[in-house]
Amino acid sequence: MAVDLFPMGFIEPILDALNRNLNYDGEYTIVGRPLNPTDPNRTIGVFPATWVANPDEKLIGMGNREPYESVYNLAIHNLIIHGDAIEGRRVYSIDSKAIRAILYRDEQFHVTLGGLTETFMGSVERVKKYDVLRQEFMVGRTGIGFTFLCKTEFIITTEITKY
């Protein structure tokens, strides 16, 4: 099986944690991509959003100035579609809180994510730290009810060393 390079290498451990903790009864659709307008109720999408280098942290040598610290921003979107605004808001808030709690508290996830490394073109990149940055909540009305969307920003900082 091929190993995905970062940032895609971060997606599977997050999907696994969400499936183990939320989807034990098959109630959710959990995917490693952005959400689509046709996705069903209770769909969660996980995907990379941005990569940022620390401009003050560079490796010098061989004419190459590669950053030795990178920050990946991953997006986790959860969607609730409900005909009743009050019940939809209740389910939406529970699911949003559960996603945040899983990212903070799931020990198996912490061990897996903390152990990730990538070797590519003479460098090794390792997970250094990670955190939930924020959640953004949005509500919209449709012809059949309400759409609730939560965008969770999860950041992973890595360090790169040459070998």
Image (cartoon, rainbow, N blue to C red):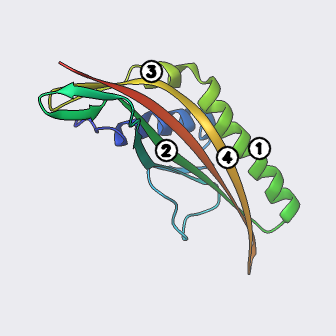
**Residue lying at 63% horizontally and 27% vertically, measured from the top left:** 104
Q: Quadrant of residue 86?
A: bottom right
* Mark-to-mark CA distance, 3 and 2: 16 Å
Task: Tell me which amino acid carries mark 2.
Answer: Leu
Q: Is mark 1 on a helix, strand or loop?
A: helix
Q: Nearer the viewer, residue 162 or 142?
A: 162
* Residue ID for mark 2: 74
Query: Is 40 positioned to the left or the right of 126 in the image?
Result: right
Q: Mark 1 points at which residue?
A: 94
- Mark 3–mark 4 Cα distance, whole angstroms, equals 22 Å
Image mark count: 4
Q: Do the residues labelled 1 and 3 touch (CB within 8 Å)?
A: no
Q: Which amino acid does label 4 sit on?
A: Gln
Residue 132 horizontal/vertical position (percent): 61, 35
- In contact (CB < 8 Å): disc 3 and disc 4: no
User: Please, what is the three-letter code of the amino acid marked with disc 3?
Assistant: Gly
Instruction: Say which element carries label 3.
Output: helix
Separation of marks 1 and 2 at Cα, in angstroms: 21 Å
Residue drawn 35% across and 37% down? 9
Q: Which residue is under mark 3?
A: 114
Q: Earlier in the sequence, mark 1 or mark 3?
A: 1
